[in-house]
Amino acid sequence: MSTMQRCAGCRRLFRVRAQVRGQRYCAARACQRVRRKRWQRAKRRTDPDYRENQARAQEAWRIRHPDYWRVYRATHTHYTNANRAQQARRDAARHLAKRDVSTAFSPGVSGIYRLSAAGGGDLAKSDAWTVELTVLSRI
């Protein structure tokens, strides 16, 4: 006689198979996907060898498919547009500022300053130059 159990994925009752010790998921495709994903997440968290092997496999895949994301974005314009809109909302909500910007800049003081292009909104900039300014004369 088989027993019934609630699936850890979909929470529906299913008939436990006697051949599967400790069965917690039903046979539904979505529940099996959840089971594998949870197993993999736990394995990555607890097994450094598995985690390292996964990282190597992902890097190898990226090397074999260098144009994947460019092609994906070109062929999935809805995804690209939605992503841009979400990023604009996140940027607006965070009020990003340029790194190392000083509001008390006094051009008559020698020192090391960071220069960056003016404009471009409030997004953080990484294309800045570090320069040293030396005051040669004060008029």
Image (cartoon, rainbow, N blue to C red):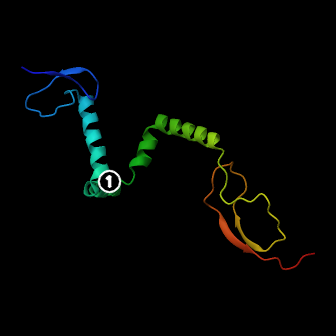
Give the total number of marks visible in the rendering.
Answer: 1
Instruction: Give the labeled residue for mark 1.
Output: 58
Say above or below: 43 vs 106: above
Residue neighbourhood size for the residue with mark 1, other residues' Cα within 10 Å, grouped as few (<14), some (14–19), many (≥20)? few
Q: Image point 47% across, 36% down: which residue?
A: 79
Say above or below: 85 vs 7: below
Q: Image point 14% across, 25% down: which residue?
A: 16
The image position of residue 17, as x and y in percent, is 11, 27
Question: Which residue occupies the extreme bottom position in the image?
Answer: 136
Q: Specify the amino acid type for callout 1.
A: Gln
Secondary structure category for the residue under label 1: helix
Say above or below: 13 vs 112: above
Q: Using the rendered view, name the quadrant where residue 74 is placed.
A: top left
Q: Image point 32% across, 53% down: which residue?
A: 58
The image position of residue 97, as x and y in percent, is 67, 51
Quarter of the image with the C terminus in it: bottom right
The image position of residue 135, as x and y in percent, is 82, 76
Q: Using the rendered view, name the quadrant where residue 130 is placed.
A: bottom right
Q: Could you tell whether 96 is left or right of 7 in the image?
A: right
Quarter of the image with the N terminus in it: top left
Q: Image point 79% across, 74% down: which residue?
A: 110
Q: Using the rendered view, name the quadrant where residue 118 is placed.
A: bottom right
Q: Nearer the viewer, residue 90 or 13?
A: 13
Q: Could you tell whether 64 is left or right of 1 in the image?
A: right
Say above or below: 134 vs 16: below
